[in-house]
Amino acid sequence: MDFKTSDGFTISYDDIAPQDYERAILLVHGFTSNRAEGWKRTGWYAALERRRFRVIALDQRGHGASGKAHAPEAYLRENLARDVVELMDHLGVNRVDLFGYSMGARVAAAAALAAPHRFSNLVLGGVGDKMLTERPSDRGEVMAQAMLADDPETITEPFLKSFRQFADEQGEDRLALAAFVRAVNPPLDTDGFASLPMPVLVVAGQRETNGDPELLAQAFADGRGVVVPGCDHFSAIPHALTKAAVFDFIDGVLDDPWAR
């Protein structure tokens, strides 16, 4: 299914709502991924449906079946966060649990800061305390060059090469992805994390390059961090222990009479 954003982008999404669903969760994938690869293939759709969640997942602009642009300003984080809220408005959903992974975690955090009353719980995956000190840099240009390289074998840094290979495997528009990472965003309002009213889970693999999830969790008023042993950035998302951490978190919040 598709909808048009307020600035004219077509956003493709899935909305899987069992008749007897108990909660709704909105999933925001990472860079070079899409809703099918990031969430369906990795088993999240099936796991959430078994727990009677309504599953809402979008292809972020520039990815998957959603609209593409080759101008960096189209991909400002405020636009990506607005897409999340506008999708909820389009579906007539007032509140959801929100789960973002990697770049999607940054978008989820921005959406929570912009509209905290719309999200019951916030899950940030594939990130750590480096989020607290991130500043605009030339890293986006390095990633853009990896997307634009004629031959991926010329990319010497393994992390960059893995993203390029993933983009190629998914058949993504590499010009759009290069524009995406060239968007210049201000730092996230990490000082505002402490004022967010919802419980927050930060979960990442033991070998995550984005820092310590437990240290990032401490920045939130009601945050908790989980490290998934033996996993890196890419292997953590499909892992059963990541799913267990997310469900334990949500179940615990629902069971806690003092939870917000």
Image (cartoon, rainbow, N blue to C red):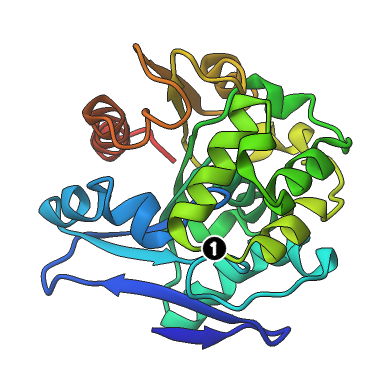
Query: Residue 153 at what x, y percent from top left?
Result: 61, 37
Compare residues 162 and 216 and report the one nearer the observer. Answer: 162
Is any atom of residue 172 visible in this view? Answer: yes
On screen, residue 155 above or below 65 = above
Question: Where, quadrant-wise, is the C terminus in this rendering?
Answer: top left
Q: Is residue 77 visible?
A: no
Nearer to me, 6 or 92? 6
- Pointer 1: residues within 10 angstroms few (<14), some, or many (20+)? many
Kindly identify which residue carries mark 1.
172
Say whether residue 71 is left or right of residue 6: right
Vertically, is 151 above or below 2? above
Residue in the foreground of this view, choosing between 259 and 29: 29
Instruction: Give percent across and percent down for residue 156.
Output: 68, 27
Rendered residue at 37%/28% (across/down): 236
The percent coordinates of residue 248 (x first, y second) are: 25, 30
- Residue drawn at (26%, 34%) of the image: 243
Under circle 1, the secondary element is loop
Q: What residue type is labelled 1?
A: Glu
Which image quarter is the N terminus in?
bottom left
Q: Which of 14 and 32 is in front in this view?
A: 32
